[in-house]
Image: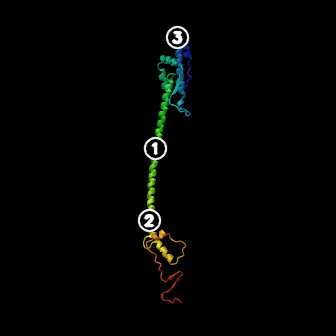
């Protein structure tokens, strides 16, 4: 908001009763207003990176009548100022314009928030899809692991030649061991271990028909 417009010529207009002097003073007053808003337009305040603003500069004229008389003299004055992105305001219009601008900014913030919400929602959806795909892969891996486990468990305890029974037979034949299968593993094995190992003894072998005392 700029409030530096000069009212010197308007004061001259008000201080005289001479019609010719008044006409000349008003002409200079109009020219002063035009020069001022052209100067404001040339500064391009809306392009400054250090401030956040709309495309218009508000040019405040503190005396309502000074603007009214200027527009009465030159009706193109107001429209020309707007064409240069300068909005002339007076005490009766400033507050309404400021409220309008605030409404515009509020709408702008809401629009940006809506765009951000949509962006975040899209990212969340994509992440959720990725998570569901990963979870499906985890389920597939668990299924594959279960199949492999069942196969290994079957080799361990199922069938006549399962690994548990083979290991027990080695123990029965005299293999030196320091550990025992758990009861659940032993119970799961299908076949009983044949502990009848014939003439074989731990570390000794007899020949059938030979004299044991020899």
Residue 182, horizontal then vertical, whole percent: 50, 69
Discs 3/1, front: 1
What label does residue 108 carry, if any?
none
Residue 57, horizontal then vertical, whole percent: 52, 27
Residue 108 visible to the viewer: yes
Residue lying at the far top in this picture: please name it.
Answer: 18
| SS for callout 2 | helix
**Looking at the image, what colour scheme do you see?**
rainbow
Q: Earlier in the sequence, mark 3 or mark 1?
A: 3
Residue 84 visible to the viewer: no
Residue 204, horizontal then vertical, whole percent: 53, 83
Q: Which residue is mark 1?
A: 121
Residue 28, horizontal then vertical, whole percent: 54, 16
- Using the numbered discs, state the Cα–Cα distance from disc 3 to disc 1 in whole angstroms: 70 Å
Q: Nearer the viewer, residue 133 or 16?
A: 133
| SS for callout 1 | helix
Discs 2/3, front: 2
Q: Earlier in the sequence, mark 2 or mark 3?
A: 3
Q: Residues within 10 Å of mark 2 (few under 14, many from 20)?
A: few
Assign the N terminus to one quadrant of the image.
top right
Q: Which residue is mark 3?
A: 20
Q: Residues within 10 Å of mark 1 (few under 14, many from 20)?
A: few
């Amino acid at each position: 908001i700029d409030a530096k417009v000069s009212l010197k010529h308007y004061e001259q207009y008000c201080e005289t009763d001479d019609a010719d002097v008044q006409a000349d003073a008003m002409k200079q007053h109009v020219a002063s207003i035009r020069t001022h808003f052209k100067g404001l337009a040339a500064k391009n305040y809306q392009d400054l990176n250090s401030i956040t603003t709309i495309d218009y500069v508000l040019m405040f004229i503190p005396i309502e009548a000074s603007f009214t008389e200027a527009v009465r003299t030159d009706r193109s004055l107001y429209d020309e100022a707007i064409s240069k992105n300068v909005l002339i305001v007076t005490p009766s219009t400033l507050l309404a314009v400021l409220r309008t601008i605030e409404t515009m900014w509020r709408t702008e913030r809401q629009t940006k928030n809506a765009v951000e919400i949509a962006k975040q929602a899209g990212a969340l959806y994509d992440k959720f899809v990725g998570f569901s795909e990963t979870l499906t892969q985890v389920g597939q891996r668990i299924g594959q692991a279960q199949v492999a486990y069942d196969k290994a468990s079957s080799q361990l305890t199922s069938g006549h030649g399962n690994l548990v029974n083979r290991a027990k037979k080695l123990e029965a034949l005299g293999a030196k061991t320091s550990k025992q299968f758990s009861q659940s593993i032993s119970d799961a094995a299908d076949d009983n271990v044949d502990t009848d190992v014939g003439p074989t003894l731990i570390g000794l072998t007899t020949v059938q028909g030979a004299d044991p005392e020899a």
